[in-house]
Image: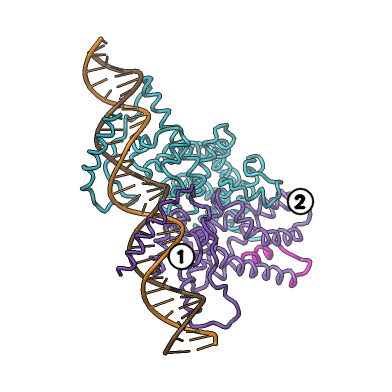
Chain colours: A purple, B cyan, C brown, D orange
Amino acid sequence: METRVAKAAANLQQRAGRRDGRRIGERSRQHKKPRPQEGPAKSKKALQSQETRDRILDAAEELFARHGLYGVTVRNVADHAGTDQALINYYFGTKRGMFDAVFERRAGGINAARMAAMDAYEAKVGASVTVEGAIRAFLQPIFENDRTADPGWRHFSALVALANNSKEWGGQMMSRYFDAVIHRLIGLLRKGLPGAKDEDLYWSYQMLSGSLMLIQAETGRIELLSKGKCRSDDVDAFGERLVRYAAAGFRELCERKRR
Amino acid sequence: METRVAKAAANLQQRAGRRDGRRIGERSRQHKKPRPQEGPAKSKKALQSQETRDRILDAAEELFARHGLYGVTVRNVADHAGTDQALINYYFGTKRGMFDAVFERRAGGINAARMAAMDAYEAKVGASVTVEGAIRAFLQPIFENDRTADPGWRHFSALVALANNSKEWGGQMMSRYFDAVIHRLIGLLRKGLPGAKDEDLYWSYQMLSGSLMLIQAETGRIELLSKGKCRSDDVDAFGERLVRYAAAGFRELCERKRR
DNA sequence: GTGGATGTTCATCACTTGATGAACTAGAGG
DNA sequence: CCTCTAGTTCATCAAGTGATGAACATCCAC
């Protein structure tokens, strides 16, 4: 006990000289990520460590989805995860590092699944792509995750929805993670909407994207508006509706022949 | 000068006893709003004060739209407005009070304009309401504000868009400000879509709302996605497209006869 | 079984945050 | 011209913020 206090006193002296202009958002030191998980050979300790890391990410995911990056403190996350605050810096270096890690953990998997779904759809129907079919393939993996028992996916979706409508993350960051899968969809849709103009396709996608994001944000709004008749978490209710609504919109804007 | 320092020292003693468990978000004292603006009789001083208040709100609007409530400090707003930090507490009591004031300032006006637009539309067409017509009337005043030279309206719209997708504000708060105007739209649409089911109407509106919010968020995303072909601030490009896209979606979900 | 690495806990730092009291200033009202 | 008050500025507070070093613990490899 006493040694700790004594050392802390020395620590105080040591730090007195630091007066750099560091601000939030800048890295203060290079963080060496502890143990990149390698092959399947997992020691007992490594497994426990991995579980701690995941528990932190789960907590961060949920809290960031609810209050955003700035509405959550490192201590909040640590408390919610039931770990020590210092572990967050140990694993992720900075608060921002943890924020990014939340995205990294899930983005790859869901994107791969969506690519695969669209590939499978195209392989099945060949040249006769329909608007509904393309959009359905694009959305299906998301809906499947929403049906999962794991609440983490829904928190993640809500976080993406929040970030997507923000000037801070909605541009560059969302582009980095999701542009590839979107361009794949646009490519598919071009087959179902021959001669469609780029502007119409992109604006239509913007509208589809907005609808999806608001639904996934699960703000409780539609419950209030509909006095409980509609529920945010009812995938069966909004899934096919979104496909049909969006497909009709795409056709209205992108089809050659006008009514 | 010296008197100030001396008094500050006394201040220090005085506050030493305060140790209540106050936390962020709780009001600490009742804030008496300084001078409720009354009739048109404005003294020179009152005018200057009103202008300061508005400059603070302008700055807050812009910064909150960019970074959210928690991403902005009271000092940030004061600096951006070119005023003293203490004036914010003087005028609005708390940071949260300022946040609410940003909404209060514009919400009433825009809602009234939208109500009037829908009233005028209904008065014009009588019983023969169309889906496009109703949606256009609902959106028109927003588009008109977007065309204004005043950048404040666009900041406000972006802030609403950000708040709308957040779990923290997207439910109760948005409901409080905007439910009335939405129910007016739904009522109009029922005339154009006889026999439509409530669930279909509400889900359709949810999708329209999401599209509108993402567009108004102006995140720069569509510029990146379309490689500059589409621009967030191009009302002429998205206005009529949104009306047509949404109308087609509503018809698809809410019309009695199926294709 | 021992020694070194990996993971965890604790105390504390430098700095920021929202808020406030008191001093100061300039108009309005007499 | 003087006074009073709404408005403004300044210094400072208590609580909280992200981050870090050092002590401690535990497990794995040897």
Q: What residue sits 55% from the left and 60% below the top?
A: A30
Q: Is residue B212 above or below residue D3?
A: below
**In the picture provided, is C7 more to the left or to the right than B125?**
left
Left or right, residue A98 beside residue B242: left
Numbered mark located on residue A131 in the image = none
> How much space separates mark 1 and mark 2, taking CA atoms?
57 Å
Closer mark to the observer between disc 1 and disc 2: 1
User: Is residue B204 one of those drawn in magenta?
Assistant: no
Residue B209 placement (x, y as % from top left) = 54, 50
**Residue A133 magenta-drawn?**
yes
Indicate the secondary structure of the residue bearing disc 1.
helix
Residue at mark 2: chain:
A
Which residue is labeled 2 in the image? A257
The correct choice, above or below, for B55 with respect to A139 in the image is above
Query: Which element type, helix, strand or loop, lies under badge 2?
Result: loop
Q: Mainly helix, strand or loop, the magenta region?
A: helix
In the rendered image, which residue does mark 1 sit on?
A88
Q: How many marks?
A: 2
**Magenta region:** A123-139
Can residue B229 be seen in this snapshot? Answer: yes
Residue B128 in sight from this viewpoint: no
Of residues C19 and B205, the one drawn nearer to the viewer in this rendering: C19
Amino acid at the residue labelled 1: Ile
